[in-house]
Structures are given as C-alpha cells and as structure tokens.
Image (spheres, rainbow, N blue to C red):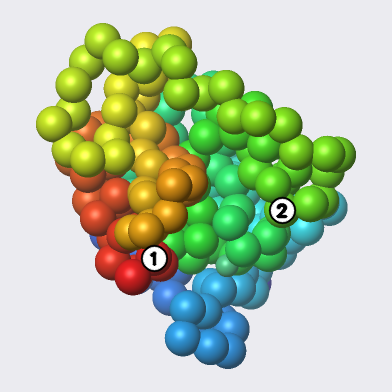
Amino acid sequence: MGGVGSRGLTEPQMRLWWWGRIELSEGKDPCWLWLGPRHRNGYGKAKWRGRTWRAHRLSWELFREPVPRGLQVCHRCDVRHCTNPEHLFVGTAKDNAQDREAKGRGRKPRKRRLVRRWRTERSNVAGVTWQKHDKVWQVHARVPGQRAKHYVGVFARLEAARRCGQAALSAVYL
Ligand SMILES: [Zn+2]
C-alpha cells in the first residue's frame, strides 16, 4: 500500500493504476472507494509527482481536467474517500458551503447568489455560462418540467464543461 509505485507514473499509467486502488460500492452509480491511505479528515491520500494529494482531487485531474487555481473539488455523494469523478464537482469554497447547506449538513440554507456575475462570455451551450470573477465555465442542469436549476460544477475549459453538462443531463436527471 502507500504511495509506492505511483510516483513515477505518467498520467495514462496513473489512470490504469487507479483501478487497482479502488473498490466499487454497491448499486448502479457506485462510489469509487479509495483503498489506499487516508488523510485524518477521511479523504483518500495519494502520492504522485512529488506531491501528496487528496485522492478525489487527483482523480478529477486524471479523469477530467486540471483544477483551476483556488477552487475545490467537492463531493456530491458525501463519501469523502470516493474518487468517482461523476460524484465530484469543482466549485469555490462558497459553492462547497452552499452545497453542504443544501444537503442539510450545515446551517440553514441561503439563497444562491452566483447567478449575477457571469454574463460577458457566451458559451452557446445551454446551461453553461462564463463566470467572470473566477474565470471558469459554470454548468447548471435543468430538470425538464422543474424550475430549479441544479448546480453541476465549474470548469476551466469550455469543452469539458459542455461534456459534463450533457453527462449530468443524461446520467443524473433523465
Ligand atoms: Zn461517491
């Protein structure tokens, strides 16, 4: 166990290596449970390229894209050692707090204030909007027939945002 063997791997090798480090939970949308060591706070711990990572954050980098500076990788599923990118989203610390509130873990829910700022760049993709302040593309998915928009996450690259938005729509909400 430990980080032995992972340090010198390339990115594709890491993706392969990852499958030997996780166990899938039950169900049709399983968590990728990290089998390696954990941080004290419950997050998985992985070593790669001279750094010790939170495993879920590294998973995002390996299977999605680099995390924009200053942003966090957060769990939808609330399982801290889950590394399934489908269960993760990238957001600001504020998003993370709001998500926690929405799930009832934190204090009482507040109204979302994110909608205002991002109007300057157009994505031409439904649900994908530019967030000027953080310089990221933000993705929302809307359930047909419902008014509420569901926050999916933010991305540095428009292409990744578009793909995730579509995946969220087809996988989670339809
Ligand atoms: Zn999960």
Query: Looking at the image, which is closer to me, 25 or 77?
Result: 77
Q: Which quadrant holds residue 120?
A: top left
* Left or right: where 22 falls relative to 170: right
What residue is drawn where x is 72% and y is 31%?
Answer: 110
Q: Which residue is mark 1?
A: 173
Q: Which quadrant holds residue 123?
A: top left
Residue 7 appears anywhere in the view: no
Locate residue 35, reporting x and y percent. Answer: 64, 74
What residue occupies the far left of the structure in this picture? 124
What residue occupies the far bottom of the structure in this picture? 26
Q: Earlier in the sequence, mark 2 or mark 1?
A: 2
Residue 139 appears anywhere in the view: yes
Disc 1 under 8 Å from ligand 1? The reply is: no
Residue flagged by tag 2: what amino acid is it?
Lys
For residue 82, above or below residue 52: below
Locate residue 79, reporting x and y percent. Answer: 68, 64
Q: Which residue is mark 2?
A: 103
Locate residue 91, reporting x and y percent. Answer: 52, 34
Query: Looking at the image, which is closer to me, 16 or 170?
Result: 170
Q: Which quadrant holds residue 22?
A: bottom right
Locate residue 85, reporting x and y percent. Answer: 44, 59
Dividing the image into four equal quarters, which quarter contains ligand 1?
Answer: bottom right
What residue is drawn where x is 43% and y is 62%?
Answer: 86
Q: Quadrant of the N terminus?
A: bottom right
Instruction: Count neighbours of disc 1 (C-alpha within 10 A) and say few if under 14, some if 14 to 19, many if 20 or more.
Output: few
Instruction: Count neighbours of disc 2 (C-alpha within 10 A) and say few if under 14, some if 14 to 19, many if 20 or more.
Output: some
Residue flagged by tag 1: what amino acid is it?
Tyr
